[in-house]
Image (cartoon, grey):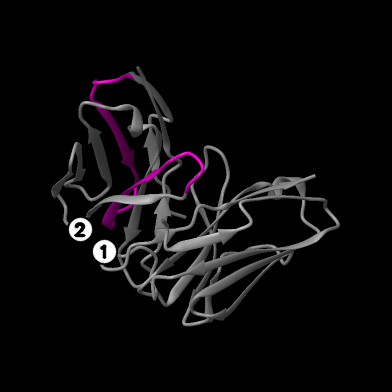
Amino acid sequence: GQQLNQSPQSMFIQEGEDVSMNCTSSSIFNTWLWYKQDPGEGPVLLIALYKAGELTSNGRLTAQFGITRKDSFLNISASIPSDVGIYFCAAISSGSARQLTFGSGTQLTVLP
Amino acid sequence: ETGVTQTPRHLVMGMTNKKSLKCEQHLGHNAMYWYKQSAKKPLELMFVYNFKEQTENNSVPSRFSPECPNSSHLFLHLHTLQPEDSALYLCASSQGSYQGTYNSPLHFGNGTRLTVT
Protein backbone atom coordinates (compact mmCIF):
# COMPACT_ATOMS: atom_id res chain seq x y z
CA GLY A 1 0.00 0.00 0.00
CA GLN A 2 0.91 3.67 -0.12
CA GLN A 3 3.14 4.99 2.65
CA LEU A 4 4.09 8.46 3.80
CA ASN A 5 7.47 8.88 5.45
CA GLN A 6 7.15 11.75 7.91
CA SER A 7 10.17 13.30 9.62
CA PRO A 8 11.33 14.09 12.10
CA GLN A 9 9.46 11.79 14.49
CA SER A 10 9.89 14.30 17.32
CA MET A 11 11.32 17.78 17.85
CA PHE A 12 12.29 19.81 20.90
CA ILE A 13 12.66 23.52 20.16
CA GLN A 14 12.95 26.78 22.04
CA GLU A 15 10.04 29.21 21.99
CA GLY A 16 10.52 31.67 19.14
CA GLU A 17 12.37 29.26 16.89
CA ASP A 18 11.17 28.22 13.44
CA VAL A 19 10.18 24.60 12.77
CA SER A 20 10.22 22.53 9.62
CA MET A 21 8.85 19.02 9.01
CA ASN A 22 8.19 17.06 5.87
CA CYS A 23 6.57 14.04 4.30
CA THR A 24 7.83 12.05 1.37
CA SER A 25 6.52 9.10 -0.59
CA SER A 26 7.30 6.99 -3.61
CA SER A 27 3.69 7.48 -4.76
CA ILE A 28 2.05 10.44 -6.48
CA PHE A 29 -0.78 12.27 -4.77
CA ASN A 30 -3.44 14.78 -5.80
CA THR A 31 -3.93 16.45 -2.44
CA TRP A 32 -1.73 17.02 0.58
CA LEU A 33 -3.15 17.84 4.01
CA TRP A 34 -1.60 18.84 7.31
CA TYR A 35 -3.37 18.13 10.62
CA LYS A 36 -2.52 19.02 14.20
CA GLN A 37 -3.54 16.96 17.21
CA ASP A 38 -3.50 18.70 20.58
CA PRO A 39 -3.04 16.48 23.65
CA GLY A 40 -6.29 14.68 24.48
CA GLU A 41 -8.05 15.80 21.33
CA GLY A 42 -8.66 14.63 17.79
CA PRO A 43 -6.71 15.91 14.76
CA VAL A 44 -7.75 19.23 13.25
CA LEU A 45 -7.08 20.24 9.65
CA LEU A 46 -4.54 23.08 9.36
CA ILE A 47 -3.78 23.40 5.66
CA ALA A 48 -4.93 21.71 2.45
CA LEU A 49 -2.90 21.77 -0.78
CA TYR A 50 -4.46 20.86 -4.13
CA LYS A 51 -1.87 21.65 -6.82
CA ALA A 52 1.77 20.72 -7.37
CA GLY A 53 4.01 23.62 -6.38
CA GLU A 54 1.26 25.32 -4.36
CA LEU A 55 2.43 27.29 -1.33
CA THR A 56 -0.23 28.09 1.26
CA SER A 57 -0.09 29.94 4.57
CA ASN A 58 -2.32 29.88 7.63
CA GLY A 59 -1.02 32.44 10.10
CA ARG A 60 2.47 31.38 11.16
CA LEU A 61 2.12 28.09 9.27
CA THR A 62 3.25 27.62 5.68
CA ALA A 63 2.97 24.42 3.68
CA GLN A 64 3.99 23.45 0.16
CA PHE A 65 2.86 20.74 -2.24
CA GLY A 66 6.03 19.36 -3.81
CA ILE A 67 6.48 19.83 -7.53
CA THR A 68 6.93 16.07 -8.03
CA ARG A 69 3.61 15.48 -6.17
CA LYS A 70 5.46 13.00 -3.93
CA ASP A 71 6.24 15.27 -1.00
CA SER A 72 5.14 18.18 1.16
CA PHE A 73 6.60 20.28 3.94
CA LEU A 74 5.18 22.32 6.80
CA ASN A 75 6.97 25.29 8.38
CA ILE A 76 6.00 27.00 11.61
CA SER A 77 7.58 30.38 12.26
CA ALA A 78 8.25 31.95 15.66
CA SER A 79 6.95 28.99 17.66
CA ILE A 80 4.85 29.54 20.79
CA PRO A 81 3.92 27.13 23.62
CA SER A 82 0.49 26.36 22.14
CA ASP A 83 2.18 24.91 19.04
CA VAL A 84 2.84 21.78 21.13
CA GLY A 85 1.17 18.71 19.70
CA ILE A 86 1.43 16.06 17.03
CA TYR A 87 1.48 17.20 13.41
CA PHE A 88 0.32 14.72 10.76
CA CYS A 89 0.69 14.89 7.05
CA ALA A 90 -1.92 13.13 4.95
CA ALA A 91 -2.35 12.70 1.23
CA ILE A 92 -5.07 11.64 -1.15
CA SER A 93 -4.17 9.41 -4.05
CA SER A 94 -5.14 9.92 -7.65
CA GLY A 95 -7.52 7.66 -9.47
CA SER A 96 -10.96 6.40 -8.56
CA ALA A 97 -9.96 4.98 -5.16
CA ARG A 98 -9.02 8.38 -3.71
CA GLN A 99 -7.51 6.73 -0.66
CA LEU A 100 -6.45 8.96 2.25
CA THR A 101 -3.11 7.98 3.80
CA PHE A 102 -1.64 9.46 6.99
CA GLY A 103 1.97 9.90 8.05
CA SER A 104 3.10 8.67 11.47
CA GLY A 105 3.26 12.18 12.92
CA THR A 106 5.81 14.64 14.28
CA GLN A 107 5.64 15.25 18.04
CA LEU A 108 6.53 18.89 18.68
CA THR A 109 7.61 20.15 22.10
CA VAL A 110 8.21 23.87 22.62
CA LEU A 111 10.47 24.76 25.54
CA PRO A 112 10.05 28.12 27.28
CA GLU B 1 -16.57 22.66 20.93
CA THR B 2 -16.08 19.82 18.48
CA GLY B 3 -18.98 18.95 16.19
CA VAL B 4 -18.14 15.28 16.66
CA THR B 5 -18.72 13.87 20.15
CA GLN B 6 -17.33 10.55 21.33
CA THR B 7 -18.17 8.65 24.51
CA PRO B 8 -16.73 7.39 26.69
CA ARG B 9 -13.42 9.29 26.72
CA HIS B 10 -11.68 6.42 28.50
CA LEU B 11 -12.52 2.73 28.69
CA VAL B 12 -10.79 -0.15 30.43
CA MET B 13 -12.08 -3.60 29.64
CA GLY B 14 -11.09 -7.20 30.12
CA MET B 15 -10.63 -9.55 27.20
CA THR B 16 -13.96 -11.28 27.86
CA ASN B 17 -16.02 -8.09 28.19
CA LYS B 18 -18.43 -6.60 25.69
CA LYS B 19 -18.53 -2.83 25.38
CA SER B 20 -19.54 -0.20 22.84
CA LEU B 21 -18.07 3.11 21.72
CA LYS B 22 -20.44 5.85 20.63
CA CYS B 23 -19.99 8.71 18.20
CA GLU B 24 -22.40 11.49 17.32
CA GLN B 25 -21.89 14.25 14.78
CA HIS B 26 -23.80 17.54 14.78
CA LEU B 27 -22.48 18.83 11.46
CA GLY B 28 -25.07 17.46 9.05
CA HIS B 29 -22.47 15.25 7.38
CA ASN B 30 -23.39 12.07 5.55
CA ALA B 31 -20.18 10.05 5.94
CA MET B 32 -18.74 8.71 9.20
CA TYR B 33 -15.53 6.83 9.93
CA TRP B 34 -13.74 4.83 12.61
CA TYR B 35 -9.96 5.19 12.86
CA LYS B 36 -7.49 3.45 15.18
CA GLN B 37 -4.56 5.50 16.47
CA SER B 38 -1.58 3.73 18.03
CA ALA B 39 1.48 5.57 19.32
CA LYS B 40 3.94 6.66 16.63
CA LYS B 41 1.93 4.98 13.88
CA PRO B 42 -0.20 6.43 11.09
CA LEU B 43 -3.93 6.59 11.68
CA GLU B 44 -5.49 3.34 10.50
CA LEU B 45 -8.85 3.49 8.78
CA MET B 46 -11.21 0.81 10.09
CA PHE B 47 -14.67 1.45 8.70
CA VAL B 48 -16.47 3.95 6.48
CA TYR B 49 -20.20 4.60 6.35
CA ASN B 50 -21.89 6.75 3.73
CA PHE B 51 -25.58 7.51 4.21
CA LYS B 52 -25.74 4.72 6.83
CA GLU B 53 -24.33 2.14 4.42
CA GLN B 54 -20.96 0.57 5.10
CA THR B 55 -18.73 1.34 2.13
CA GLU B 56 -15.41 0.18 3.50
CA ASN B 57 -14.16 -2.44 5.94
CA ASN B 58 -10.40 -2.24 6.03
CA SER B 59 -9.75 -5.90 6.92
CA VAL B 60 -10.76 -5.32 10.52
CA PRO B 61 -11.09 -8.40 12.79
CA SER B 62 -14.65 -9.47 13.53
CA ARG B 63 -14.21 -8.69 17.23
CA PHE B 64 -14.87 -5.09 16.11
CA SER B 65 -18.43 -4.64 14.91
CA PRO B 66 -19.65 -1.25 13.65
CA GLU B 67 -23.22 -0.02 13.58
CA CYS B 68 -24.59 3.10 11.93
CA PRO B 69 -28.32 3.54 12.63
CA ASN B 70 -28.46 6.95 10.95
CA SER B 71 -26.13 9.54 9.41
CA SER B 72 -25.54 11.22 12.78
CA HIS B 73 -24.67 8.23 14.95
CA LEU B 74 -21.98 5.60 14.76
CA PHE B 75 -21.15 2.81 17.19
CA LEU B 76 -18.26 0.41 17.52
CA HIS B 77 -19.18 -2.77 19.40
CA LEU B 78 -16.26 -4.55 21.03
CA HIS B 79 -16.04 -8.15 22.22
CA THR B 80 -13.25 -10.56 23.15
CA LEU B 81 -10.59 -7.96 22.44
CA GLN B 82 -6.85 -8.54 22.74
CA PRO B 83 -4.31 -6.38 24.62
CA GLU B 84 -2.87 -5.23 21.28
CA ASP B 85 -6.24 -3.61 20.56
CA SER B 86 -5.45 -0.98 23.20
CA ALA B 87 -5.32 2.35 21.36
CA LEU B 88 -7.11 5.64 20.81
CA TYR B 89 -10.21 5.11 18.66
CA LEU B 90 -11.19 8.17 16.68
CA CYS B 91 -14.49 8.85 15.00
CA ALA B 92 -14.67 11.31 12.11
CA SER B 93 -17.27 12.67 9.74
CA SER B 94 -17.26 14.47 6.41
CA GLN B 95 -19.78 15.87 3.97
CA GLY B 96 -18.61 13.81 1.03
CA SER B 97 -18.19 10.08 0.82
CA TYR B 98 -14.47 10.19 0.24
CA GLN B 99 -12.15 10.71 3.13
CA GLY B 100 -10.97 14.27 3.59
CA THR B 101 -11.21 15.50 0.04
CA TYR B 102 -10.58 19.17 -0.56
CA ASN B 103 -14.24 20.06 -0.44
CA SER B 104 -15.04 17.69 2.39
CA PRO B 105 -12.37 17.65 5.10
CA LEU B 106 -12.54 15.15 7.94
CA HIS B 107 -13.79 16.43 11.30
CA PHE B 108 -12.51 14.25 14.15
CA GLY B 109 -13.89 13.63 17.62
CA ASN B 110 -11.59 13.63 20.65
CA GLY B 111 -11.41 9.87 20.71
CA THR B 112 -11.93 7.04 23.19
CA ARG B 113 -8.76 5.83 24.92
CA LEU B 114 -9.24 2.05 25.15
CA THR B 115 -7.17 -0.19 27.39
CA VAL B 116 -7.65 -3.96 27.18
CA THR B 117 -6.38 -5.84 30.22
* Residue A57, picture quadrant: top left
Q: Position of residue B111 (x, y in %)?
A: 55, 53
Residue at image location 16% in from the left, 56% down from the top? A51
Residue in front for this viewpoint, A6 or B38: B38
Residue in front for this viewpoint, A80 or B54: A80
The answer for which chain carries disc 1 is B
Q: What separation in Å lies between label 2 and label 1 (alpha carbons)?
A: 7 Å
Secondary structure, mark 2, is: loop
Residue found at the far front of this picture: B1
Residue A82 higher or lower than B53, as above or below = above
Q: Which residue is mark 1?
A: B102
The answer for which chain carries disc 2 is A
Residue A67: image tag: none
* Mark 1 residue crowding within 10 angstroms, few (<14) / some (14–19) / many (20+): some
Q: Is residue B53 left or right of residue B103?
A: right
Q: Is residue B88 left or right of residue A46?
A: right
Q: Which residue is mark 2?
A: A50
Q: What amino acid is labelled 1 in the image? A: Tyr
Residue at image location 20% in from the left, 29% down from the top? A77
Q: Which residues are magenta?
A: A14-41
Q: Position of residue B8 (x, y in %)?
A: 64, 56
The image quadrant where one finds the C terminus of chain A is top left
Residue in front for this viewpoint, A4 or B89: B89
Whether the residues at callouts 2 and 1 have beta carbons within 8 Å, the answer is yes
The verdict on residue A91 being magenta is no
Q: Is residue B79 visible?
A: no
